[in-house]
Amino acid sequence: MLSLKEIKRRLSEHPLARVGPGLVTGAADDDPSGISTYSQAGAAYGYGLLWTALVTWPLMIAVQLMCARIGTVARAGLASVLREHYPARVLWFACALLLIANTVNIAARMAHPWRVSLTMRPNVYVKAAGISRRP
């Protein structure tokens, strides 16, 4: 059986060991609905909204850092910490927000293939008119 020191040494030798959870966090929102949203926003506004990245980036770092520290100190997830330290209505409010956010995200993911099919499929009526014409 490997010792803890040997496991840590082997993990530190792996090239992806230095990347950490940032890779997973960064790739978490690169789904088809996100890509189509980014493409549409880029086509509509160009670089005009790029300044918002400078504002939101430190905020995203702060949220990730707070979540990591809560998890490290409490050795529990956010729901457990809320249940332990706050009234039940705060936990239920957080769960309701999570439910709403997940529902909107699922709806966006389901709408993406439908949106793409509307923009990329050939127009059936134009084809039917072209076929029915007689020379």
Image (spheres, rainbow, N blue to C red):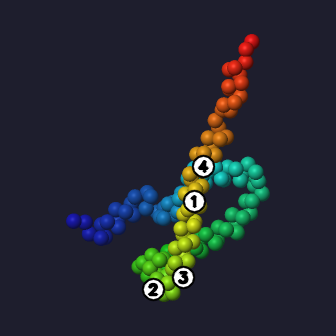
Q: Nearer the viewer, residue 3 or 131?
A: 131
At 72% from the left and 64% from the top, the residue drawn is 52
Residue of label 2: 84
* Kind of residue indicated by mark 1: Asn
In space, the residues marked 3 and 1 are separated at their CA atoms by: 23 Å
> Can see residue 93?
yes
Instruction: Check the picture and name the quadrant holding the N terminus.
Output: bottom left
SS for callout 2: helix
First of labels 3, 1 by sequence position = 3
Residue of label 4: 112
In space, the residues marked 3 and 4 are separated at their CA atoms by: 33 Å
First of labels 4, 2 by sequence position = 2
Q: Taking 50 as reference, is 115 above or below it?
A: above
Q: Quadrant of residue 127?
A: top right
Residue of label 3: 90
Dot 3: within a 10 Å radius of its alpha carbon, few (fewer than 14), some, or many (20 or more) residues? some
**3 and 4 marks in contact (CB < 8 Å):** no
Q: Residue furthest top?
A: 135
* Kind of residue indicated by mark 3: Val
Drawn side of residue 62 relative to residue 19, left or right? right
